Amino acid sequence: MDIRSSFDALDKQFTAYGGLIGGGITRLLYSEEWVNAVHALKSTLEKEGFSTRFDDVGNLTGRLEGSKYPNEVIASGSHIDTVVEGGHLDGQYGILAATVAMASLKEEFGQPLRSMEVVALAEEEGSRFPYGFWGSKNFFNLADKNDVIDITDSEGVKFENAMRNAGFGFREHDNDYSDIKSWIELHIEQGKVLESEQQSIGVVNGIVGQKRYTVTLHGEANHAGTTPMGLRRDTVVAFSDIVTHLTQRAREVGDPLVLTFGSVEPVPNTVNVVPGGVTFSIDCRHINQDELNVFADEITAYVQKVADRDGLTVDIDLWMDEAPTLMEPSLVQQIEQSAQKVVGEQDYRVMSSGAGHDSQIFAKYVPTAMLFVPSINGISHNVNEETELSDLVKGIEVLKDALYNLAYKE
């Protein structure tokens, strides 16, 4: 099997399911495009000799039975849904790469000692309904139907109706995942590190922890012409100080800490009134929990300091507090050895993931690792999302070597 042509053909085929004029995909959970994609994938896997099964909610698994240790499973895959006007690689690449890698191993070496499974998770993005990781949360029996039974999409379609129209339902039987001995997710980086360093492979050692805040500063709205500068309680000036100071501090701390002020809403937001209120977001991420906590303490302390100095009151809502997720060290080492073998020491790096992935759910229950390939210009969640085909192939080849070591060797 030629990996390059096999993957390229599959990628073109599956990009058509939800494919947009001019490129990209919109393939939302339980949509017609999603249904067509999962059933086409089922047929593709069966043609390659995989046995297939859907679980209750629509997670699809393709299995190559092991000859000696059939109850030990080496699994790989990703999510099959996309964001609205997304690219053709986020999620889809991991599924098709696992399919090609396992089919290539079967053709070259025959039946594995341990079972190998391709897993296409029903949903990760949270793009159609306000709920993310529906696939992996059901895979590990975590999802509660009460969390989604009353939610609707932007067109008013209820979650349950969409699911049943797609031929699926709520989980009636818990999944048994105890036989999974390794999970590897191959994914595009969705960032610029590998491209800027001119490297083809990222071996992921962890997924960053995240703290997200909504902060509201309360001052006093007043006339822009008659209120002297020294008598103002201007919340935008305070906000500007907070952004400038904390951004500079984040740069001083350095990588892998990242800090983002992504949303700001001044009140009353008009040209001739001193803003008496402002609500803004803070997103802080780091792979090390202790360092994340230290900087988080610095954030809240400085926000309070500025508010006190400027005669303001402040509300700070920490509404997301996700701990970092570390990958399985032995599995990371195994993939690093495969990367050394396939691309050489200079063409890969060990790195953390700044974005969330299904693997952060998997890692809590089974040995987990991830692989990255570069994203051109760091672009993702965009119709212009792209990776050089040569780098996509290298990712599959590293995955193939790791799967061989895990599934074919004693």
Image (tube, helix red, strand yellow):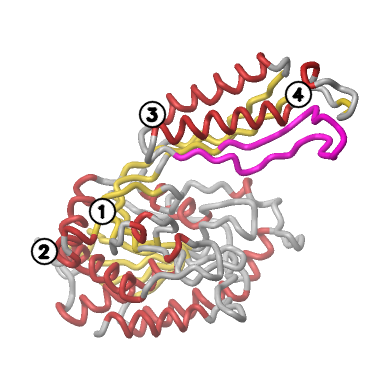
Where residue 260 sits, quadrant-wise, is top right
Rendering coords of residue 65 (x, y %): 24, 71
| C-alpha gap between disc 4 and disc 2 | 64 Å
| C-alpha gap between disc 4 and disc 3 | 30 Å
Span shown in magenta: 258-282
Q: Residue at x 26, y 61 (%)?
A: 74
The three-letter code of the residue at mark 4 reads His
The answer to whether residue 56 is visible is no
Location of the N terminus by quadrant is bottom left
Q: Residue at x 71, y 26 (%)?
A: 217
Report if the CB atoms under discs 4 and 2 are less than 8 Å apart.
no
Label 3 belongs to which residue? 291
Name which of mark 1 and mark 2 comes first in the sequence: 1
Rendering coords of residue 19 (x, y %): 57, 78
Secondary structure of the residue carrying tag 1 is strand
Q: Residues within 10 Å of mark 1 (few under 14, many from 20)?
A: many
Label 4 belongs to which residue? 218
Which of 141 and 5 lies nearest the eye of the viewer? 5
Label 2 belongs to which residue? 409
Per the rendering, the mark at residue 191 is: none
| C-alpha gap between disc 1 and disc 2 | 25 Å
Secondary structure of the residue carrying tag 3 is helix
Label 1 belongs to which residue? 349
Name which of mark 4 and mark 2 comes first in the sequence: 4
Name which of mark 1 and mark 3 comes first in the sequence: 3
Q: Residues within 10 Å of mark 4 (few under 14, many from 20)?
A: many
Name which of mark 4 and mark 3 comes first in the sequence: 4
The three-letter code of the residue at mark 2 reads Lys
| C-alpha gap between disc 3 and disc 2 | 39 Å
